[in-house]
Image: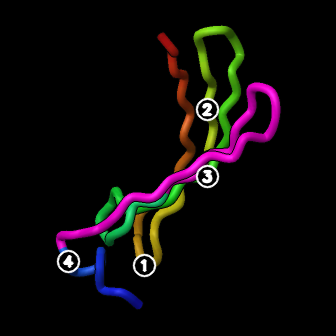
Amino acid sequence: MSRLGSQSPLGFQLGGELHLGHKKTLVFDHISGSTPISMSTLGFTRYFHKNWIFSLGAQIPNHHQFVPNGIVVEFTRVL
């Protein structure tokens, strides 16, 4: 297991998107480390209006984290 992110003040953030079709996208993010913000998310987004995106996903703590799982709900206005 790498020590980068576990005891080091350095870490990384990784994310990506997979387009599933018209107006739908699978999204994922990972933030390394062992702090309460060190977690992964997996969810989807969908345009529901010309200028609005709805996002829904799961927030999963990194290994050996003692924080609860969470749900992400987001409305984004596209300008």
Q: Residue at x 22, y 69 (%)?
A: 10
Q: Which mark is residue 8?
A: 4
In the image, residue 5 sits, relative to residue 24, either above or below, namely: below
In the image, residue 7 sits, relative to residue 12, either above or below, namely: below
64 or 15: nearer the viewer: 15
Mark 1 touches mark 4? (CB < 8 Å): no
- Residue named by callout 3: 42
40 or 14: nearer the viewer: 14
In the image, residue 10 sits, relative to residue 76, either above or below, namely: below
Spatial CA span between label 1 and label 4: 16 Å
Spatial CA span between label 3 and label 4: 25 Å
Precedes in sequence: disc 3 or disc 2 = 3
Quadrant of the image occupied by residue 32: bottom left
Q: Residue at x 51, y 15 (%)?
A: 78
Precedes in sequence: disc 3 or disc 4 = 4
Q: Identify the element where label 1 is drawn.
A: loop
